Amino acid sequence: MEFDFLRNFSSPIYILLIVASAFFLWGAITLLRAKKTPQKISRGNKILLWTLSGFLIILFVFFIVNLVSNFLQGGEFFQPKVIEISDEFPPPPSLEEFPPPPSK
């Protein structure tokens, strides 16, 4: 199995999730620093609300893109991957490979 972290990480959806996370932190910090000022509290709430809406839209788009991509490739969307396990197991280690127990 190949690990394509950097290729997947550069996907636009992941970049959008990182940007949305930054906006969420910005809204949380704005809300925490409001000090009972109604305008700043309102601004922090709006930032958090719009960021949450953005998260939901990004996740919905991600789901739809994967669904359409899988459908066009002829696969089933919720089909689990089958892992083949060989019947051959390595031999158990011999007792000589282990260090002796500590003496008291």
Image (cartoon, rainbow, N blue to C red):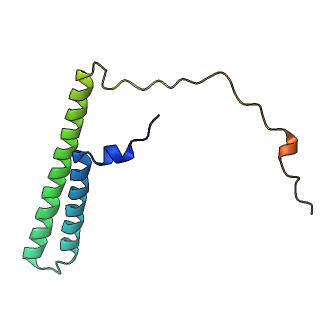
Query: Who is closer to the viewer here, 10 or 28?
Result: 10
Of 2 and 102, nearer the camera is 2
Establish if 51 lies above or below 32: above
- Rendered-image quadrant of the C terminus: bottom right
Left or right of 1: which side holds 63?
left
Between 4 and 64, the residue placed more toward the observer is 4
Outermost residue, top side: 74
Residue plotted at (54% across, 23% down): 84
Percent x, y of residue 8 = 32, 43
Residue 92 image offset from top left, x and y in percent? 78, 34
Tally the marks.
Answer: 0
Q: Residue sitting at 31 percent across and 20 percent down?
A: 75
Quarter of the image holding residue 41? bottom left
**For residue 67, above or below residue 10:** above
Q: Is residue 1 above or below residue 7?
A: above
Instruction: Kindly give the residue lying farthest to the right in the view shown.
Output: 104
For residue 60, side relative to residue 82 (left or right): left
- In the rendered image, residue 100, in percent from the top left (x then y), is placed at 88, 52
Rendering coords of residue 65 (x, y %): 21, 34
Q: Is residue 103 left or right of residue 38?
A: right
Tell me which residue sits at (28%, 48%) in the image.
10
Relative placement, left or right, of 54 versus 17 is: left
